[in-house]
Image (cartoon, coloured by chain):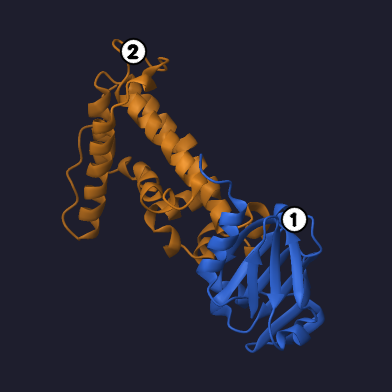
Amino acid sequence: MARIRTTDDTLVVEIEGLDKLWALKSRLEIPLENVRGATADPGAVREPKGFRAPGAHLPGVITAGTFHLDGERVFWDVHDGSRAVVIELRDERYARLVVEVEDPRATVALIENALTPSAG
Amino acid sequence: MVEAAADLFARRAYDGVSVDDLVAHLGVHRNSLYKVFGSKRGLYLAALRWHLEHRLRPLLARVRAAPDPAGALRDLATSPDRGADLDLLLLAMAERAPVDPEAAHEVAGALRDLDAAVAPGPHATAGAGGAARDPAYAPTATVLGLRLCLRAAAGSGGAPFDPLPPTRD
């Protein structure tokens, strides 16, 4: 599970609990200008994930760590695919993050609001 | 792909279209979808813009050129063939514009175009400038409301509405 928050110009992804060990990562900080969007996507977990290096992959139990697929590097931290959010990045080490969050809808709204210039 | 997405988003609510639906209907790989559009919202906005530019705008040009633009717009809304071309705009007005400033911007522009199409200046011809200065909220609201009623009636299993004569030239 990941906890996601935004500051004025940064997306902060904090990996919680033992997932830090499986994912070998406790925190990611991404400049908001490098965040292209976020999508609640329960189906993402059923996609091929490529090969893992490094991290843990026990199908149906946990997908955590760095995976390589089609020349892209994707960071995963998902136990329960129904709560997965896909965060697409640009000009970053990772092409995208697929992380499980407490409330996917609220997380997507949080990120979209941080990215979208206010109306007017 | 954007055209197919527009058709899908015109039939179902935004939240009712999952990435699984998009992948299945558009025949695109999930990773490609994210790579090209960034998110479901990114694809939605691209589909909405495509639809307004390539579907709605040509229809409004025909409406504007008709002898009776308000009547032509009403015919359009009730047409079994073309009426659905208003549905994505309707859904965008109801569910995305209130929460998404970029969707709201697109919707506001489309509504201005609708108003302008049915309220041209006196003896205006197609493409007459300044038509938007005299907005016709009532005809636009009536026509969109009419389309909403027809959409609801279609879902109730009632008889489809009678086809109307083709739009006059």
The total of numbered circles placed on residues is: 2
B22 in relation to A43, above or below:
above
Left or right relative to A105: residue A60: right
Quickly name the residue at label 2: B124
**Residue B109, image x and y in percent?**
44, 34
Q: Colour of chain A?
A: blue
Mark 1, Cα crowd under 10 Å, few <14 / some 14-19 / many 20+, is some
Image location of residue B158, percent across then percent down: 16, 57
**Of B78 and A104, the residue lying toward us:** A104
Question: Which numbered disc, 1 or 2, marks the residue closer to the eye?
Answer: 1
Q: Which mark is residue A90?
A: 1
Q: Residue at x 79, y 60 (%)?
A: A92
Q: Kindly give the residue lying farthest to the front in the view shown.
A: A8
Residue drawn at (43%, 48%) of the image: B97
In contact (CB < 8 Å): disc 1 and disc 2:
no
Say whether residue B12 is left or right of residue A49.
left
Q: Which chain is orange in the rendering?
A: B
Q: Chain of mark 1?
A: A
